[in-house]
Amino acid sequence: MRVELVVPNCPHENLASERLRQALDDTGHATTPVEVRSMTPDTVAGTPEFAGSPTILIDGADPFAEQTSGSGAFSCRVYHCEAGLSGAPSVERLRQVLRR
């Protein structure tokens, strides 16, 4: 499994990284590395899978794509979580995605 965290100097990078690592560990993927990919305003336009920061890609696909408008904006992304809106997906939502 290839896991990427796409972040252009994002204030939610640490939160997303911590939650993603916890979810990977919890679902039996403790040895799966997380590749962190930085974006610039110039590279965002040519990256259709980028839907704001942070974006998490599993094998090149955005498992949270249904929550976005697909704008690919160089801006913060908001995730719908159990407790409301957040700058990163919850550990539980990440676990669900990784178990699919």
Image (tube, rainbow, N blue to C red):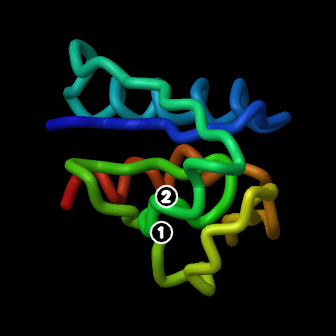
Marked residue nearer the N-terminal end (2 or 1): 1
Label 1 crowd (10 A; few <14 / some 14-19 / many >=20): some
In the picture shown, does residue 73 fall above or below 30?
below
Residue pointed to by mark 2: 93
Badge 2 vs badge 1, beta-carbon distance below 8 Å: yes
- Residue type pointed to by label 1: Phe
In the picture shown, does residue 50 fall above or below 91?
below
- The quarter of the image holding the N terminus is top left
| Residue lying at 49% horizontally and 58% vertically, measured from the top left | 93
Quadrant position of residue 17: top right
Label 2 crowd (10 A; few <14 / some 14-19 / many >=20): some
The answer to whether 80 appears left or right of 12 in the picture is: left
- The quarter of the image holding the C terminus is bottom left
Q: CA distance from mark 2 to mark 1?
A: 9 Å
Residue at the extreme left? 1
Q: Nearer the viewer, residue 49 or 96?
A: 49
| Residue lying at 64% horizontally and 79% vertically, measured from the top left | 71
Q: How many marks?
A: 2
Q: Which of the labelled discs sits on residue 13, or is there none?
A: none
Q: Nearer the viewer, residue 28 or 53?
A: 53
| Residue lying at 78% horizontally and 64% vertically, measured from the top left | 83
- Residue type pointed to by label 2: Arg
Residue pointed to by mark 1: 64
